Amino acid sequence: MQVSVLASGSKGNAVYVEMDGCRLLLDAGISATRIKKALLAQDVDAASLDGVLITHEHRDHIAGLATLSKWYHLPIFSRRATFENMSCRGQLPPECICPVESGFKLAGLTVTPFSTSHDAADPVGYRIQGSQCMALATDLGFVTANVQSAIEGADTLVLEANHDPEVLKNGSYPWVLKRRILSNRGHLANSDAAWAIARMKRRPRKVFLAHLSEENNRPDLARDTVQRILAKQGIQQEIIMTSQTETVSG
């Protein structure tokens, strides 16, 4: 299994997953040109993708989707309400739109969307199962029992560690935005990410910490917070930090 986070953060998100010969793109929140170039750097032709999985309709997850679908006519999978609320909905070829409500098979893999708590129409994370298992859970205000169950047993986990609450509270964001981020339908704090990992009965071989806020977090702060909490629980875990500007693989 290969997992490459092409970009992660408030300015755009995209993750490439290859498993058992199946090639998937999770979110397309950066330009189609950048996606194409990032995949070519991994020796992957974007035209060879078996599908694009979209978590929700916010721009930082779909910015490159219309152009990508125009170029390659790839099948796009997401919730029906997500498609209905996409700003680019009218630009997507009808034959590419594949609404999903539950788990489905794709090129030999089982793809299971699971609901997340975020201020979007019907946001999801994804669990992808083949000879190994990968899960992505970002853009969630808190880790529900449903999310905790969905990430259990993942060999590789891409998990949000968006902010440090004290940095956020003392930062320059207007209070209405701070309240949104801190809410149960906002974004996940570093410590909450750590406890989600700690609660896993079978912990991943690798955890990518994703969707870090540029203003309300720092890579070293996110890593140190998560590792400190895990260490107190006697847990050693490989942590990989993602980037808004560079591809990170693991």
Image (cartoon, helix red, strand yellow):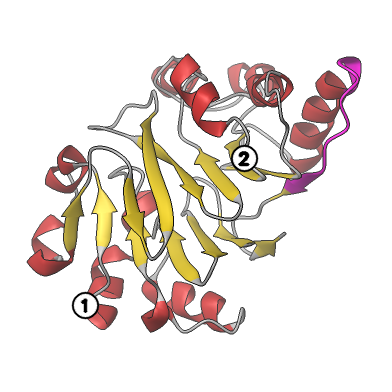
- In this figure, which residue is indicated by the disc labeled 1? 70
Q: Which mark is residue 34?
A: none
User: Could you give the CA–CA distance between mark 1 and mark 2, rounded to whole angstroms?
Assistant: 33 Å
Residue 155 included in the magenta stretch of the image: no
Q: Against 203, is 75 above or below?
A: below
* Quadrant in the picture for the C terminus: bottom right
Magenta span: chief secondary structure: loop
- In this figure, which residue is indicated by the disc labeled 2? 154
Q: Visible in this render: residue 107?
A: yes
The three-letter code of the residue at mark 1 reads Lys
In x, y percent, where is residue 122? 25, 32
Residue shown at the point (39%, 20%) measured from the top left = 185
The three-letter code of the residue at mark 2 reads Ala
Q: Against 142, is 32 above or below?
A: below
Q: Against 57, is 29 above or below?
A: below
Foreground residue among 130 and 208 = 130
Foreground residue among 75 and 163 = 75
* Quadrant in the picture for the N terminus: bottom right
Left or right, residue 57 beside residue 197: left
First of labels 1, 2 by sequence position: 1
Which type of secondary structure does the marked residue at label 1 adopt? helix
Q: Against 235, is 67 above or below?
A: below
In x, y percent, where is residue 61? 38, 51
Of circles 1 and 2, the one toward us is 2
Foreground residue among 68 and 94 = 94
- Highlighted range, magenta: 231-240
Q: Image quadrant of residue 154?
A: top right
Residue 235 included in the magenta stretch of the image: yes
